[in-house]
Image (spheres, rainbow, N blue to C red):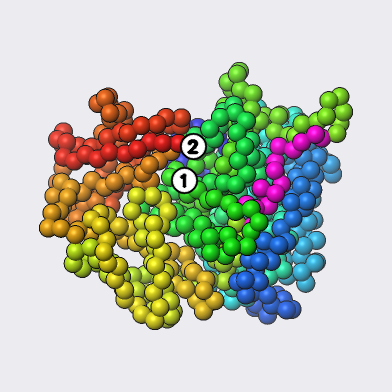
Amino acid sequence: MKRLLLSISLFSFSFFIASSQSNIVCTDTSAQNVMLGKYSPLTYLASPVLNRPDTIFQGINKRISPDSLKSYIITMASFGNRNTASDTISSTFGIGAARRWVYSKFQEYSFANQNRLLPAYLQFTLSTCGVSQHRNIIAVLPGIDTTDKSIIIIEGHIDSRCENVCDTTCKAEGVEDNASGAALVMELTRVMSKYSYNNTIVFMVTTGEEQGLYGGQAFVNYAKAKGVKIKAVLNNDVIGGIICGYTSSAPSCPGYGDLDSTHVRLFSYGSFNSAHKGLSRFIKLEYKENLLPIVSVPMSINIMSPEDRTGRGGDHIPFRGGGFTAMRFTAENEDGNANVTDTAYHDRQHSTRDTLGTFKKSTSVLDSFFVNFPYLGRNAVINGNAAGMLGIGPKQPDFNLTTVGNGTLRIQVTKQTQYKQYRIGVRTTTNDWDSVYTITGTLIDTIKGLMHGVYDVSVMSVDTNGIESLPSTEYSSTVTNTDEVRGISKNIELLQNKPNPFDFATYIGVKVNSNVEYRDAYILVRDMQGKELKKLPIKLNEGTNEVLFEHGYSARGIYSYSLVIDGRQVASRQMIFAN
């Protein structure tokens, strides 16, 4: 996982990559045609077709193997150095040997599943650490219905690094970062290719992530140039470790040696009406309803506020920047904040210490592994369940939201009205839904008895198998149950921060009902002693406007925030910082 330079905005960073990459090609014509939807599903039809939701998620849960994940990671570590610019000739050392091995595994999985899986390379040219040609490894599983030509991507980067990002000879096993993510993608390729999905699924192992998210950006550029439609991207990076290091990138773990094998973090961009947060909420909902009743070890899924940890980035970011819905899975605990220039840095991330584990004294026998393979397996199951349900689920709806009377919201589905059932997700002060309502046999419903406040609402279609679509556009409405209207006026309202309480970062919003004239506006954050902590400029466009307040980790307390317009403080609220 790359440590982004804070002095460079992600937008300008992505623009630079996009403008400098060239010669992006898929090495297999059949794989490319499938990604474009230009194929006959009959050509790749399985016998038998296994596409019932319970068959898929129960099968994924049963067949994901911690032992398989362990074997993949041991093999990846054996290549010694998987730097993007490392050796491509050797059969035992370097990125070339690693990617050929992954490709051969994809071929093996295809042979075991009626040759339905199409392995290929996504090749691109970019000068990186003295090397110009690079390759992602992909495996394309054709969908059985080309009505919706959008694909689903499960990805993780395979490249590793040492303290020097261009060192191509050092010991760079890169086990947690990111053999764990690449292994997860490989295991899901093996397991999920047994089943059939309406949408095409692309399993992708990227390169060039550590130097600048290059592999992810290459696919974005390729998709835009060719017209490949993307439904969702699930990125996996630092996803198998359970040990907290001396340092970690906030928001992260509480302290050195802490162990956590039952939580996973979902990072995604935005807050209100973010398709990326909607995808994260969908992943969590599908886990709760499909897997939680049958898993032996329950997992808690945390939907995080920021797109990534402070100063960090991953391959989901180029996809979001390209206009595609994307998110990132990351372990709850991680060993290091990647600040390898600090002489006091002793953690594993981005160093020669990111190895398989510890050895018995004076022997070459491993005593313990740094990656917890059952934990990695549980995270793979969460990924696979979400991607599988996305692959067979219904179309995304749209709706109208209005306030009718005191304490009542009215929802009317206006797009994709053919379904017999819909689910309504309602949020107030957190990143997750407070409640999910089900309506059957109608396109109109009301939610009554709501307290005064701002409610964010989205809708999901539900098919005859009980599987939800991705959430719709999210709409916001202020509910009143008295004659009093809170806020500055009926025109502008300072919203409660979300989430609240929060751990590291939280979004602060201002709702503007109609255009206002002003010179400048900002959110002023203070502690309870009145000390100014931060001024966050905010635009007051019609609708909901948000800014992200990042306080930092390892702090607690109550803070106030105020909306200041043209030098006048017009509204204030309080928020709670807790971790």
* Amino acid at the residue labelled 1: Met
Tell me which segment is drawn in magenta.
Answer: 366-381
Q: Quadrant of the N terminus?
A: top right
Image point (30%, 28%), residue name: 527
Secondary structure state at the residue bearing disc 1? loop
Residue 204 appears in the picture as rendered: no
Image point (75%, 45%), residue name: 73
Q: CA distance from mark 1 to mark 2?
A: 9 Å
Question: Is 186 left, or right, of 238 in this rendering?
Answer: right
Whether tag 1 and tag 2 are in contact, CB under 8 A, the answer is: yes
User: Which quadrant of the figure has residue 88?
Assistant: top right
Tag of residue 251: 2
Tag of residue 5: none
Image point (60%, 65%), residue name: 388
85 w.r.t. 541: above or below: above
User: Which quadrant of the figure has residue 475?
Assistant: bottom left
